[in-house]
Amino acid sequence: MPSWVSLLTRRSLPETLILDTGKPQPGVSKAVVPVAGRFSRVKIEFSFNYGYDDFPSELNVFFKASFNASPPLVTVHWVKPNGEDVTLKTLQIPKEGSYYVSNDDALAKELRSALSGKLNKTIEYEVPVTTLLFAVEDEDLLNPGTAKVMKGAYKLWMEGSAFETGVDVDAKLTVYGKVYGWAGTDHLRRDLGIAILWGTPIALSFGVIAAVSIALIQMFIGAVSAWFGGSVDTVTQRVTEIIMILPFLPILIMISTFYKFNIWVLLLVVIALSVFGGGVKNYRAMFLQVKEFPYVEAAKAYGAGSFRILTRYLIPKVLPTIIPSVVLSVADFVFLEAALAILGLGDPLTPTWGKVINDSYRNGALYKGLYYWVLEPSAMLTLTSLSFAMLGFALDKIFNPRLKEM
């Protein structure tokens, strides 16, 4: 969950804590001391304060050792704020390995049995290891959801032996919390903030490039159709009418289903399917009026060519009027890319807003109560569309003479 959930619940929810002997950190110590012969004593300590109102989600220890043939043997201990020392496990340290404390069923069974003996009562549910290690040992622990966190200084320490010379051992303690960052994490503990920030320029680039490219191409086609007239105008209008009849979104979905494009090839496909759209007819109507202006007749009289008239006299006259429509259509293409990604038809590798929503749907975010996973990218889509809509309406009042206010 995001860190701001703590403000809403008014509880101090735990954040992830990482202590590593490979990095100089307070509360971390490591010693590999040679003793008789080839033997060495290994001792590692991790000390930290835990003052949160809820239990961590997981507790894991990761190891990295360097040796030739005989792996070091260590015993892992857990010390609570009340001074109680709990032996977790004795294990051999591989060159790269891990000890998932919260998934140790044997440890959970042993801790539950010890707790039942202390309270002289039977525990009727499977208490998680993290709860047993961080809870106050009283009768509130007998019922799910009523256990209280024992706040204070904790220590995980391990001591053992190395059986060769030149042995080195590093360890990393990770206490996984329940909140992380401003956006939270997904089911693989990946920061959603990175995906949302990464998807912002991609979504805006897709929308802006598509809107500007389609508007300019449609305007040029409309100008050519209006200026040359005759068979050129007839063919252009018939092609436009045929394209307008064809369903755009189903065709795009079909193409995306058969060919898994990356997002930029998908952008080219969207532009190709949209160049002969309704905008061609709108621009043609504008150019039919503009080409009758006196300065255009004057240009024809002094012998200006068709290309010069199109690019120097017709298009510049109409160009300012397309700016509001371009701005308004940016949000349409941002939503189009997101819709394809939500349907699983977008770029499978690029982290876009739609891809984040698709991942949340596939992993049952709403069923698991992870509403932020859906709401955050949806809010970005809504804010983007609202921003471009407000900007487009404002520009429309500026560039459209009929909407200018006195």
Image: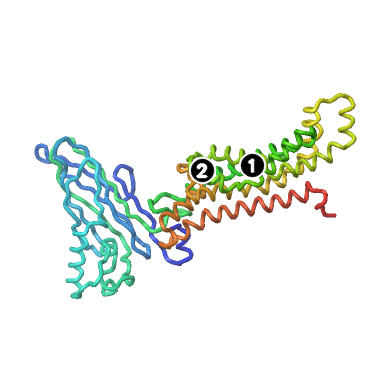
Query: Can you give x and y, in whole percent of width and height, for residue 274 in the image?
Result: 64, 42
What residue is pinned by disc 2?
256
Query: Can you give x and y, in whole percent of width and height, for residue 276 in the image?
Result: 67, 40
Identify which amino acid the numbered label 2 is placed on.
Ser
Of pointers 2 and 1, the one earlier in the residue sequence: 2
* Residue lying at 21% horizontally and 59% vertically, measured from the top left: 105
Q: Quadrant of residue 94?
A: top left
* Residue lying at 82% horizontally and 33% vertically, measured from the top left: 313
Query: Can you give x and y, in whole percent of width and height, for residue 140 in the image?
Result: 29, 74
Q: Where residue 274 is drawn, which disc sits there?
A: 1
Q: Quadrant of residue 379?
A: bottom right
Q: Is residue 104 above or below residue 295?
A: below
Q: Where residue 255 is drawn, which disc sits there?
A: none
Nearer the observer, 294 or 197: 294
* Residue lying at 80% horizontally and 28% vertically, measured from the top left: 306
Q: Is residue 313 above or below residue 345?
A: above
